[in-house]
Amino acid sequence: MAEPKYRIRSLHTGSTITVYQAYSPEIGLPAARDGRFPPVWQRDRMTWIKPSFLWMMYRCGWGTKEGQETVLAIEISRDGFEWALERACLSHYEHGLHADRAAWKRQLKQSPARVQWDPERDLHLRPLTHRSLQLGLTGEAARLYTDEWIVSLTDVTALAHTVHAHVREGDLEAARRLIPRERPYPVGDGALAHLCP
């Protein structure tokens, strides 16, 4: 069966969803140690969370890019994630989805969250035909994320390096066994209608 172009795939439980971010060790290590972001984390900036492990690997180069050397798996409440989705705006204007460009700009300015759909990645980090959700949080959403939604923060940098080593060695089966088992995230009918072009 063909994979839908727009669908959230994630590691999730009945009450949580796991998302990924990558930071410098200055932020990532104390966050994993203390279970919360340190004071140096800037809550007034847009922060992007990604439910796809492989898209995060593409973004951070398997935890090798400068400033992204520490990869975090962040378990957050599904209630919080869905609150952000409900209030999110697509990060770019889409004819037919928005009344006009001015209406989209107004919505974008007022929304505490924004969504981008970027090509999902395979183990070689090549783009696939279906899309992966990136959720940007700002203002109220960023505050709620760091203060209320986070259930746990785990350093998965070693996992990223191990999976990457298997891929480099050509042992894709070993790599597949280690990556998180992401499955379709259940959302209500029409819950993503305002976010899918």
Image: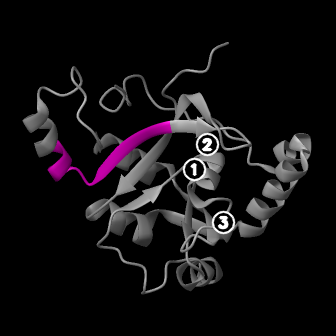
Element at label 3: loop
Displayed quadrant of residue 19: bottom right
Q: Amino acid at mark 2?
A: Ser
**Numbered badge on residue 36:** none
Q: Amino acid at mark 3?
A: Gly
**Mark 3 = which residue?**
63
Distance from label 2 to label 3 (Cα)? Answer: 20 Å
Element at label 2: strand
Question: Which of marks 1 and 2 precedes in the sequence?
Answer: 2
Nearer the camera: disc 2 or disc 1:
2
**Mark 2 = which residue?**
10
Q: Is disc 3 surrounded by few (<14), some (14 to 19) or many (20+) residues within 10 Å?
A: many
Residue 112's place in the image compared with 102, above or below, is below
Distance from label 3 to label 1 (Cα)? Answer: 21 Å
Residue 2's place in the image compared with 104, above or below, is above
Tell whether position 19 is magenta. no
Displayed quadrant of residue 158: bottom right
Nearer the camera: disc 2 or disc 3:
3
Residue 101 position in % (x across, y down): 12, 34
Q: Residue sitting at 65 percent across and 38 percent down?
A: 126
Residue 53 position in % (x across, y down): 65, 50
Q: Residue sitting at 53 percent across and 74 percent down?
A: 67
**Mark 1 = which residue?**
17
Q: Residue sitting at 59 percent across and 47 percent down?
A: 55
- Give, as a single range, the part of the protein colored magenta: 107-118
Give yes or no for contact between labels 2 and 1 (Cβ–Cβ under 8 Å). Answer: yes
**Could one spot residue 57 in this view of the protein?**
yes
Residue 174 position in % (x across, y down): 91, 46
Closer to the camera in the image, 189 or 22: 22
